[in-house]
Image (cartoon, rainbow, N blue to C red):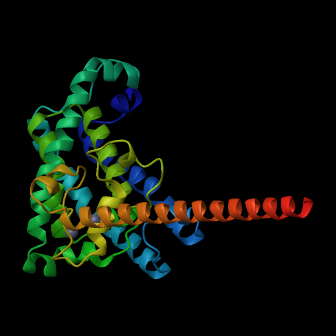
Amino acid sequence: MQYLITHFSDFQLASLGSFFLHESVFFLSGLPFIYLERAGLLSKYKIQTKNNSLAAQEKCITRLLLYHIGVNLPLMIASYPFFRFMGMKSSLPFPSWYFQLELVGRKVVLSQIIFYFILEDFVFYWGHRILHTKWLYKHVHSVHHEYATPFGLTSEYAHPAEILFLGFATIIGPAITGPHLITLWLWMTLRVLETVEAHCGYHFPWSLSNFLPLYGGADFHDYHHRLLYTKSGNYSSTFVYMDWIFGTDKGYRKLKALKRDGVEEESKQMESKKKASKHNREDEFSKALTSRNTGYR
Ligand SMILES: [Zn+2]
Ligand SMILES: [Zn+2]
């Protein structure tokens, strides 16, 4: 960090630095899921049985590069004066990330990040619901829904108008609090990892949603992509409570309950089958014993 601060200006770090960090985190976390899908690895954890074609995956990557350079980069450059005005800093006289974080105040960083996640989820929920109205869906949001079987990189595949519209949800938190550049980069990294995971198409035993009760994750958002736009629900980006409060997760909950009942029913059937075969075995054993006993007589 010290190297970056001494060799680059605040402007370069906040705009170009943020852009390169975003690209690295996004592609490094998203590309492995394309590989998993193509190679058919870990397929038992894949949420949908359908796979994307090579052409569909390539189309996603080329469009993303185009939008990232044509929309995201200019946006990062243009918003710098605003962040600066709101009090964003990058230079601190400490040599390492650890001390830098210490000086910014770890509590401050943590509370700002939590606040950004909650605020982003709230704004995203309403913005996303608006995008599911007829006209906006047809002309804007349907681009993101081209992929009914999402994979990590489809998380940012959207109409440029949507990138600007929902991007607002991501930057509103930092915009009103004027964080340190480190906090901004940490937030960007976590937000990218979160949205890539939500679109990855796999639900692993180690997925975060298995451990954090309010966290949506891949299973939650994959449902949103599978269904028709008027019936999809599950509009939140990170958490599940907004959809629960406003009743837009009813279909998803019903499906979960059906699956749970199905699994329970299946395991009950398995259990009774096991018991039945155990009884049969016991019957056969006692029969054999009786016939042997009778044989002795
Ligand atoms: Zn949607
Ligand atoms: Zn999506």
Q: Is residue 23 left or right of residue 77?
A: right
Residue 144 quadrant: bottom left
With respect to residue 287, does 19 lie above or below? Answer: above
Q: Position of residue 107 (x, y in %)?
A: 24, 22
Q: Residue furthest right?
A: 296
Q: Position of residue 288 (x, y in %)?
A: 80, 63
Looking at the picture, tell me which residue is in the foreground, 76 or 198: 198
Quadrant (top left, top right, bottom left, bottom right) of the N terminus:
top left
Looking at the picture, tell me which residue is in the foreground, 283 or 201: 283
The residue positioned 14% from the left and 57% from the top of the image is: 125
With respect to residue 189, does 132 lie above or below? Answer: below
Q: Position of residue 234 (x, y in %)?
A: 21, 62
Camera sees residue 46:
no
Q: Is residue 290 left or right of residue 90?
A: right
Residue 292 quadrant: bottom right
Residue 3 quadrant: top left
Ligand 2 falls in quadrant: bottom left
The residue positioned 39% from the left and 64% from the top of the image is: 153
The residue positioned 59% from the left and 69% from the top of the image is: 39
With respect to residue 218, does 141 lie above or below? Answer: below
Q: Residue furthest front?
A: 297
Q: Is residue 2 left or right of residue 281?
A: left
The residue positioned 43% from the left and 66% from the top of the image is: 47
Looking at the picture, tell me which residue is in the foreground, 95 or 171: 171
Q: Position of residue 70 (x, y in %)?
A: 26, 66
Camera sees residue 12:
yes
Quadrant (top left, top right, bottom left, bottom right) of the C terminus:
bottom right
